[in-house]
Amino acid sequence: MQSAIRPTAGRNVVVVGTQWGDEGKGKIVDWMTDHAQGVVRFQGGHNAGHTLVIAGRKTALQLIPSGVMREGVACYIGNGVVVDPAHMLGEIARIEALGIDVRSRLFLSEACPLILPFHVALDSAREGRRESSGSGKIGTTGKGIGPAYEDKVARRALRVQDLKHPQRFENKLRELVELHNTELAYLGGAPLDWQPMLDGALQAAEQLRPLMADVGYRLYNAHAAGQNLLFEGAQGTLLDIDHGTYPYVTSSNCVAGNAAAGSGVGPGMLHYVLGITKAYTTRVGGGPFPTELSLEEGVGHHLSTVGQERGTVTGRARRCGWLDAAALKRSIIINGVSGLCITKLDVLDGLPEIKICTGYKLGGQMLDVLPMDADEISACEPVYETLPGWSDTTAGLTNWEQLPVNAKRYLERMQALIGAPIDMVSTGPDRVHTILLRHPFRA
């Protein structure tokens, strides 16, 4: 019997963050698109921030897949992504202003839930209530992501496909505005008028209609035709709604398994999982962080300033700490990581010694993997192993043999502790600042 997928089928790679996001996924996706014909976003929204540096020019993307910076690469936004129409059109215009063609190769799933103004208002009002009540802010980006996913799960979301049917859109919109205005009033917010929302959405619909597509079927056919596809995750594994440091998490599944559900393809189309891991650890927003260091002095200050650790979307200072191998072990198990890419190794240049958290003490017990309960994580005392640092620079190196001896030893020890091979090392922000040990599309 002939296979449904022809023998010429391409090879597909999933890129996910293995920490709390901000690991440098955008640069790596951009770097690997020289071997891919399509890049797919499968979760999150414009709360993601992927910064690319190409020939010294910095470009920050939030919703559009990072493959847009490579000429001729198709860009897909899968059904697992929540879409703010106004933001999407603004981001398209900003990229087009750089002289890059976007619309002819951008495909938007009709099943994407929409983010509308009442989602943003609810997001901000809830965070304000948490802060005033003393219960502790989650640290959302305030983009309306969580409330939009709530509507999706409650089966009342307005989706991209509804924009094709103005009367249907209006009827559903009026119901949603009435529902959410009730909560806004409870939270002390001002009610919103549905008419300006309708006018703005229908105006955006005229520009979005040519981009609407059956993304899952397009990906199936692209794969069958021999094209290589790159699935681009947003945020990081430890922010996953199910597997992260709940409730200090994002509102979607950030793990590799969701690349299938969030784009409309079968898991058999996912061949290699590349985990992106910063050479130290950072996180933005609230929540437990066992290896956190003070940003005011010492190593924490070094990581923050040398690493330029500020959020791409919010501009907030990122919390910084030593590498947490026990947390990475959890991520590698959840994602089924095939290989790792270590980023920002050059930020550690010049430190006399470097620590790795190998596990935790908790209630008289030793743990070698991150617990699942946020309160337990907060109570964990990290156990460190200390390695000698290096004085020579690693910035911009492109060959493993060029690395200082102690930098190699640090990476080799990390690899041994977490149980996954290091296939790539990023030594700077530009796409060419990369050491390749094993190519994901050829592994």
Image (cartoon, rainbow, N blue to C red):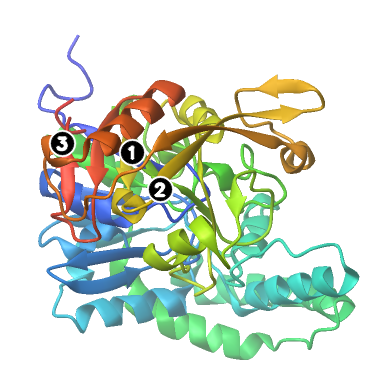
Are the two marked residues, 1 and 2, in contact with CB atoms closer than 8 angstroms? yes
Question: Mark 3 belongs to which amino acid?
Answer: Trp
Which residue does the image show at 66% across and 50% down from the upper left? 153
The image position of residue 300, as x and y in percent, is 52, 58
Residue 102: image x %, image y %?
A: 21, 70
Circle 1 — which element? strand
In which quarter of the view is residue 273 placed? top left
Residue type at mark 1: give it: Val
Q: Is residue 316 visible?
A: yes
Whether residue 267 is situated above or below residue 295 in the rendered picture: above
In this rendering, the answer to whether 101 lies above or below 292 is below
Q: CA distance from mark 3 to mark 2?
A: 27 Å
417 vs 393, left or right, is right
Mark 2: secondary structure: loop
- Residue drawn at x 21%, y 40% is 404
Q: Is residue 149 above or below residue 211?
A: above
Mark 2: which amino acid?
A: Gly
Labels 3, 2: front one: 3
Q: Which residue is mark 3?
A: 400
Using residue 397 as the reference point, say whether residue 203 is left or right of it: right
Would residue 350 appear left or right of 321 to someone viewing this image? Answer: left
Precedes in sequence: disc 3 or disc 1: 1
Q: Quadrant of the N terminus?
A: top left
Residue 233's mark?
Answer: 2
The mark found on residue 54 in the picture is none
Of residue 41 and residue 254, the one placed in the foreground of this image is 254
> In the rendering, at what x and y percent does residue 390 appear?
30, 45
Q: Tell me the residue that label 1 is attached to.
A: 14
- Residue found at x 17% / y 42%: 435
> How many numbered dots are placed on residues in this image?
3
**First reached walking from the N terminus: tag 1 or tag 2:** 1
Q: CA distance from mark 1 to mark 2?
A: 7 Å
